[in-house]
Amino acid sequence: MLKGKTVILGVSGGIAAYKAAALASALKQGGAEVYVLMTEHAKEFIGPATFEGLTGHRVISDTFRSEEFLIPHIRLAAMADLFLVAPATANIIAKLSAGIADDMLTSTFIAATCPKLVVPAMNVNMYENPATQDNLDRLRQRGIVVLEPAVGHLAEGSVARGKMPEPSVLYRMAEYMIGCNKDLAGKKILITAGPTREPLDPVRYLTNRSTGKMGYALAKAAAMRGAETVLVSGPVHDAGDGVDNALLTGGGGNASDSVLLPAGVKRVPVQTAAEMAEAVKKESRDADCVIMAAAVADFRPLRQEPEKIKKAKLKQETDPETGVRGYSLSLERTEDILAWLGAHRQPGQKLAGFSMETENLLENSRRKLVEKQVDLIAANSLKKAGAGFGTDTNIVTLIRQEGERELPLLSKEETAQEILNELFAETE
Ligand code: CTP
């Protein structure tokens, strides 16, 4: 996602400097050219050789000595698509805020006109000091993105705010800032994801195998393309790395059924189909587009018992066809949220849904397009290898009134981009 982009990573002298190595590596693996600028103090915490090995470029600290560039601060500043300072100490923040340019990092920062991201990491008292807060406010006023540090174990042994967010979080932030053209800026896109849980009693519930991956990929694509993105999410396995940030939560982890909340996405967590319906009705009022990727439970238990159902108290019945004795569960339909959206469409609003079938995929999906009065149904067969629940790939046919387009086996992120392209084709 960062292919062809040049990222400058400024590293200042804090204990979190070691994490900047993992960040440099992630940026490089994401396709970016990465140039690391270190302050002299940063070298007390980590050696330049680590960054040089990871990025393939010499670390520059001295404005007057570079093997790669003549007038390195001006040259690098002109090349940069993103300038990231991580970790940013109280001292470097003060310098950047005051416009001091007394080393390679600060000189390049002031010369660069690209988007900038500053990631403070320090002792909580240093962070909360009014001087630091004033300096950060000044940076924000100039359009520089400042990340709130996470709460966690700090070097001095206490648990407090001041920890640098995990490299995976910073990587996603970089992707969000420069990974895509902002062709959907000014639009609000509402996406639903994950399963719903329909309780039987306080202990048990009915649900399905959705992991939320497709919906989260759609939210990521929409946010990266500049849309105001709201994600109404059923219960998913969040790999979260405990980042308490208005813009960023989640991250890290590698469990195959887990998802990461993308940067720039507002998440509205829900449990049941009824809660999802309520959240969607509220958020869709001013949405330019709604994409229902959630696997909403079609049925819920007719009765939700306030106390745990005891098996000894359940009545057995005899199945009239088979004669087998067993237990039965009474269900009722949940509201079809997508059909409701189709019937209450706001002027100009685009609506899309998914259809997952094991047989008669196209026929059933075409019927849903008409019945639910939507613009697009993304149809995927559960029987195709590489498609369906929990996978990172999908094989989807995009069905519209005007025609159909079968996509090849793509990652869910690529599939998400194609769905947005299809929906917003005329505005591109
Ligand atoms: N959907 C919804 N509300 C529901 C159920 C589904 O909004 N209560 C949405 C899903 O998010 C998805 C689309 O409708 O976008 C799927 O349609 P649906 O008819 O529920 O699909 P299936 O469950 O596959 O249909 P069927 O029961 O006919 O197999």
Image (cartoon, rainbow, N blue to C red):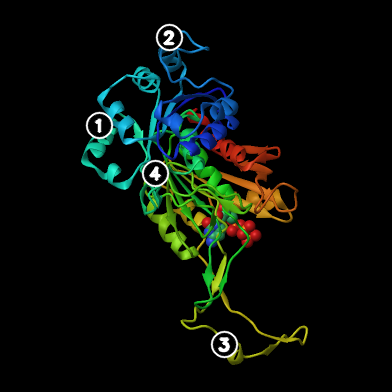
* Quadrant of the rendered image containing residue 359: bottom right
Amino acid under label 3? Lys
Q: Is residue 288 left or right of residue 411?
A: left
Q: Nearer the viewer, residue 321 or 165?
A: 165
Q: Are marks 3 and 2 in contact (CB under 8 Å)?
A: no
Amino acid under label 1? Arg
In front: label 1 or label 3: 1
Q: Nearer the viewer, residue 125 or 381?
A: 125
Q: CA distance from mark 1 to mark 3?
A: 61 Å
Mark identifier at residue 230: none
Q: Is residue 327 left or right of residue 230?
A: right
Residue drawn at the location 45% of the way across and 12% of the way down:
65
Q: Is residue 371 visible?
A: no
Amino acid under label 2? Ile
| Sequence order check, earlier mark of 2 and 4 | 2
Q: Is residue 95 above or below residue 125?
A: above
**Which residue is tagged 1?**
138
| Sequence order check, earlier mark of 3 and 4 | 4
Q: Is residue 182 above or below residue 190?
A: above
| Sequence order check, earlier mark of 1 and 3 | 1
Total numbered labels? 4
In front: label 2 or label 4: 2
| Sequence order check, earlier mark of 3 and 2 | 2
Mark identifier at residue 71: 2
**Which residue is tagged 4?**
247
Is label 1 in a helix, a strand or a loop? Answer: helix
Q: Are marks 1 and 4 in contact (CB under 8 Å)?
A: no
**Which residue is tagged 3?**
310
Amino acid under label 4? Leu
| Sequence order check, earlier mark of 1 and 4 | 1
